[in-house]
Image (cartoon, coloured by chain):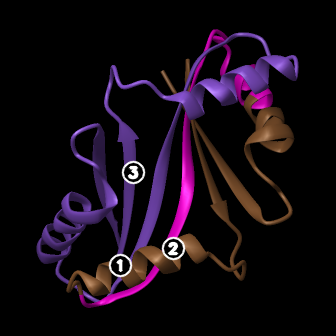
Chain colours: A purple, B brown
Amino acid sequence: MKAKVHVTLKNGVLDPQGKAIGNALSGLGFTGVDDVRQGKYIELDLAEKDPAKARESVEAMCRQLLANTVIENYAIELVG
Amino acid sequence: MKAKVHVTLKNGVLDPQGKAIGNALSGLGFTGVDDVRQGKYIELDLAEKDPAKARESVEAMCRQLLANTVIENYAIELVG
């Protein structure tokens, strides 16, 4: 079973990396880009076959390692 | 209109960051994680309202800045 995890900065948290991308895009001549936010995308291959147990285990991974829950949100999607 | 862009390493390209996450997870006692791949997730707020034009413009951004197409794939999803 595969798990796809998105880790994104919470609203209101400054995103200098997104800002840098926005500036680079406008430097390249792309107009009409109002805001850019960058997050992380993590794909996990899990041996676990049971979706409920897999989700529980990935939740624990997010809380303990993958996301800094003070400033980041995470979203988990299970596939297959 | 919002664009969500996933930039991931192509298959066969080594992913040391994913490897490090995998090792850290097993160090924390998480078993049954076979493989970890880390990619980037970028959200763009676009002024453009026409989906076809927005996709074209985001494609160009990916090719020119957001992804290194030698080693990375990108996927674009338009919302709203």
Few, some or many residues within 10 Å of mark 2 (<14, 14–19, 20+)? some
Q: At 29% from the left edge and 48% from the top edge, which residue is drawn?
A: A74
The answer to whether tags 1 and 3 share a subunit is: no
Callout count: 3
Chain letter belonging to callout 1: B
Q: Is residue B79 above or below residue B5?
A: above
Which label was assigned to residue A6?
A: 3
Distance of mark 2 from mark 3, alpha carbons?
14 Å
Foreground residue, B10 or A9?
A: A9
Chain letter belonging to callout 2: B
> Which segment did they paint magenta?
B31-57
Residue B40 painted magenta: yes
- The amino acid pointed to by label 1 is Ala
Which label was assigned to residue B24?
A: 1
Chain letter belonging to callout 3: A
Which SS class for mark 2?
helix
Distance of mark 1 from mark 2, alpha carbons?
10 Å
- The amino acid pointed to by label 2 is Gly
Which label was assigned to residue B18?
A: 2
Q: Is residue A38 above or below residue A42?
A: above
User: In which image quadrant can residue B57 be found?
Assistant: top right
Q: Position of residue A70 (x, y in %)?
A: 22, 40
Left or right of residue B19, residue B32 in this image: left
Q: At 47% from the left edge and 55% from the top edge, which residue is drawn?
A: A41
- The amino acid pointed to by label 3 is His
Left or right of residue A53, residue B43 in this image: right
Q: Where is residue B54 in the image (x, y as percent from the top left)?
A: 71, 23
In front: label 2 or label 3: 2
